[in-house]
Image: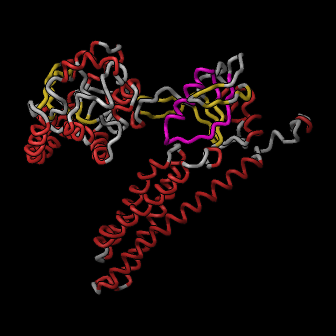
């Protein structure tokens, strides 16, 4: 090989590792400085929380006046701050937005306290309780507040003025359009989409979600486009008709971008069901299929019994007051019973506090033209059949409380898809019947994600995601989120 063949037209050696283009290097420096400022602020907050506890211990005159007070505070602050840096970096690597940064905060605090507990056991010092009572709540609250403030300020700025990664989306027109639609719909993933590179022969700009995205070139021009535009992330929306394209693309992007993301249609599969394995020349994605066996159903049933039993005690105390309000507001029964479809298509009578007049079903026909519900659902934001007390009960989901009896007798679950009417099931398409694989629930992903503000397609997708990825941890998380939604209701009418 001659010496001349070692060099490209731009003067770069083919035997030399690719250099990061100046535009990308400048941007990466800005990102590193931003994250350093974040880490410094986080560390300062944690140190102040630990120092406040140590000061309170010293002033209390207890057994913690000695060096163990300072050592305990230093250990907790160091481990907590260090773990938060690592976990937050992993969250950003996964494309997580501000909303998901709560988990790195909680996890890092748990790690810090676990290490402090080990130190306390080995040294015999009485340092655990003060930090559990003061440092952890104070530190977590301050970290979350700072993130909430930063997220509110960032939301006011155009995406072009944020540190969101400059992104180029590659693939067919249909694949790119679907990928951009999904990215725009998920607030956790923020990308500054500069444009697209389409494999279709007819090159034209794309309009998605009311925004116009320029078509900048073809998949073969992606590396050059990345260097010209200072792109950080390239998203391949679907397969290209070239088995070696991805391999060559990853090589050509070295020094021109930081991430190559392969979009997949396995959108409703939980991460715990996905594993990766490498074979010669292949990257294999293993997807565990959902199971609907008796053991998983027993675990869910046990959780339902415990939660329903605990919930029915305060509900029994509240019922007389709610019943009195319903009776004084409008004549008729306190409870409302309606036929619904449960697991495997079995019918049952759902139980609710009555929120409408007794002639509600008779008046439905005259309101059909004003239906605002999605798909086969019937909903009205300002339904004239709803009573004054009923409007309050609906707003805070109090009308659903008697359904815990349905849970206790095994007709429903605490968490699950929304229980449909027989008329709704009659209009189901084939895939939607998967909602009936599990017991319907009092709450679910649909309730904590917007309820009646969701489209029919969004509601179905959330329900199917739950059916396929159910776990006890998921149920507990949804129950906790439901409590927050009841305090600040959205989409409840």
For the point 30% across and 17% down, which residue is it?
A: 368
Q: Quadrant of residue 453?
A: top left
Residue 182 appears left or right of 74: right
Front one among 384 and 272: 384
Front one among 17 and 260: 260
In the rendering, at what x and y percent does residue 82 appear? 49, 62
In the depicted structure, whether residue 22 falls above or below residue 460: below
Counting every numbered tag in the picture gives: 0
Front one among 407 and 354: 354
Residue 326 appears left or right of 223: left
For the point 49% across and 34% down, which residue is it?
A: 276
Q: Which residues are magenta?
A: 170-198
In the rendering, at what x and y percent does residue 351 appear? 14, 30
Residue 309 visible (yes or no): no
Quarter occupied by the N terminus? top right
Q: Quadrant of residue 489?
A: top left
In the rendering, at what x and y percent does residue 2 appear? 91, 35
For the point 61% across and 58% down, which residue is it?
A: 34
Q: Is residue 368 magenta?
A: no
In the depicted structure, whether residue 191 falls above or below residue 62: above
Q: Quadrant of residue 393?
A: top left
Q: Is residue 186 magenta?
A: yes
């Amino acid at each position: 090989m001659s010496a001349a063949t070692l060099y490209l037209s731009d003067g770069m050696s083919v035997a030399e590792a690719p250099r990061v283009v100046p535009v990308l290097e400048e941007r990466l420096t800005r990102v590193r400085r931003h994250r350093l400022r974040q880490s410094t602020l986080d560390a300062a907050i944690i140190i102040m929380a630990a120092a406040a506890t140590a000061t309170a211990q010293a002033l209390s005159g207890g057994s913690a006046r000695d060096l163990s007070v300072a050592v305990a505070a230093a250990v907790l602050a160091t481990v907590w701050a260090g773990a938060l840096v690592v976990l937050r970096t992993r969250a950003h690597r996964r494309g997580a937005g501000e909303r998901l940064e709560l988990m790195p905060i909680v996890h890092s605090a748990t790690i810090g306290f676990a290490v402090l507990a080990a130190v306390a056991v080995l040294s015999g010092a009485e340092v655990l309780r003060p930090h559990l009572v003061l440092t952890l709540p104070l530190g977590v609250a301050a970290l979350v507040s700072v993130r909430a403030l930063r997220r509110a300020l960032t939301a006011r700025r155009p995406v072009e003025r944020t540190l969101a990664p400059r992104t180029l989306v590659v693939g067919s027109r249909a694949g790119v359009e679907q990928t951009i639609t999904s990215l725009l719909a998920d607030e956790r993933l923020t990308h500054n989409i500069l444009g697209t590179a389409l494999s279709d022969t007819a090159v034209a700009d794309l309009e998605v979600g009311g925004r116009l995205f320029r078509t900048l070139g073809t998949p073969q021009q992606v590396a050059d486009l990345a260097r010209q535009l200072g792109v950080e992330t390239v998203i391949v929306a679907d397969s290209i008709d070239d088995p070696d394209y991805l391999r060559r693309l990853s090589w050509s992007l070295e020094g021109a971008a930081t991430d190559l993301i392969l979009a997949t249609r396995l959108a409703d599969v939980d991460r715990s069901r996905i594993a990766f394995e490498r074979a010669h020349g292949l990257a294999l994605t293993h997807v565990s299929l959902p199971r609907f066996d008796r053991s998983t159903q027993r675990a869910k049933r046990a959780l339902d019994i415990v939660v329903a039993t605990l919930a029915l005690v305060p509900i029994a105390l509240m019922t007389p007051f709610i019943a009195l309000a319903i009776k004084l507001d409008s004549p008729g029964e306190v409870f409302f019973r309606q036929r619904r479809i449960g697991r495997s298509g079995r019918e049952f009578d759902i139980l609710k506090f009555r929120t409408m007049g007794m002639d509600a079903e008779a008046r439905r026909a005259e309101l059909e033209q004003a239906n605002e519900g999605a798909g086969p659902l019937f909903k009205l934001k300002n339904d004239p059949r709803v009573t004054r007390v009923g409007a309050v009960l609906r707003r805070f989901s109090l009308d659903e409380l008697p359904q815990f009896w349905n849970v206790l007798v095994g007709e429903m679950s605490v968490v699950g898809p929304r229980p449909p009417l027989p008329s709704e099931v009659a209009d189901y398409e084939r895939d939607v019947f998967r909602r009936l694989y599990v017991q319907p629930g009092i709450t679910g992903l649909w309730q904590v994600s917007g309820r009646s503000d969701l489209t029919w397609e969004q509601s179905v997708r959330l329900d199917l995601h739950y059916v396929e990825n159910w776990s006890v941890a998921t149920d507990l998380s949804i129950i906790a989120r439901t409590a927050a939604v009841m305090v600040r209701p959205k989409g409840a009418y």
